[in-house]
Image: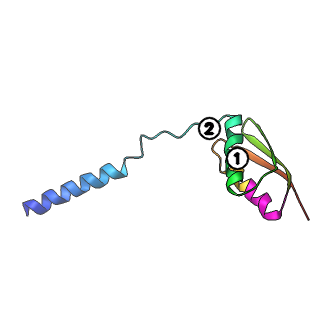
Amino acid sequence: MKKAFVSLVLSAALVSAIGCSNWNRNTPASLDNSTIEQEIRKNLLGDHITGLQIEVHDGYVTLTGHGSTSDRQKAYDDAVKVNGVKGVTNNISIQQ
């Protein structure tokens, strides 16, 4: 009985320690405009999208250029997922 109680107490302590481990982590700081642009370019390159213009002002991104419908959506998604982006204006025109 005593061994079962000790096992139960140790298990509860372990679970509570693991469950509370995220409380003291800091949220990463937002990136500056040039770093945001670089991260977006990396994301676009990963999707094989080139030739777009990217402007970033205070975390707001404007995408311009030409591409397919899927590239337009991928470029938007690539920009939105970068830390520090507050909004994206997608001015990419669709090539026919």
Give the colour scheme shown: rainbow
Q: Residue at x 52, y 40 (%)?
A: 27
Q: Quick check: 95 left or right of 35?
A: right
Q: Quadrant of the N terminus?
A: bottom left
Read off the residue under disc 2: 30
Q: Residue at x 67, y 51 (%)?
A: 43
Magenta part of the chain: 67-75
- Please tell me whether residue 93 is drawn above or below residue 24 in the rendered image: below
Residue 59 in the magenta stretch? The answer is no
Residue 26 is situated, as x and y percent measured from the top left of the image, at 48, 39
Q: Secondary structure at mark 1?
A: helix
Label of residue 15 in the image = none
Residue 70 in the magenta stretch? The answer is yes
* Label 1 Cα crowd, 10 Å radius (few <14 / some 14-19 / many 20+): many
Q: Secondary structure at mark 2?
A: loop
Which amino acid does the dot numbered 2 rest on?
Answer: Ser
* Label 2 Cα crowd, 10 Å radius (few <14 / some 14-19 / many 20+): some
Residue 64 is situated, as x and y percent measured from the top left of the image, at 85, 48
Between the C-alphas of marks 1 and 2, the distance is: 14 Å
Q: Quick check: 87 left or right of 13?
A: right
- Please tell me whether residue 53 is drawn above or below residue 34 in the rendered image: below
| Residue sitting nearer the eye, 65 or 22 | 65
Q: Residue at x 8, y 60 (%)?
A: 2
Read off the residue under disc 1: 40
Label 1 or label 2, whichever comes before in sequence order: 2
Residue 23 is situated, as x and y percent measured from the top left of the image, at 42, 44
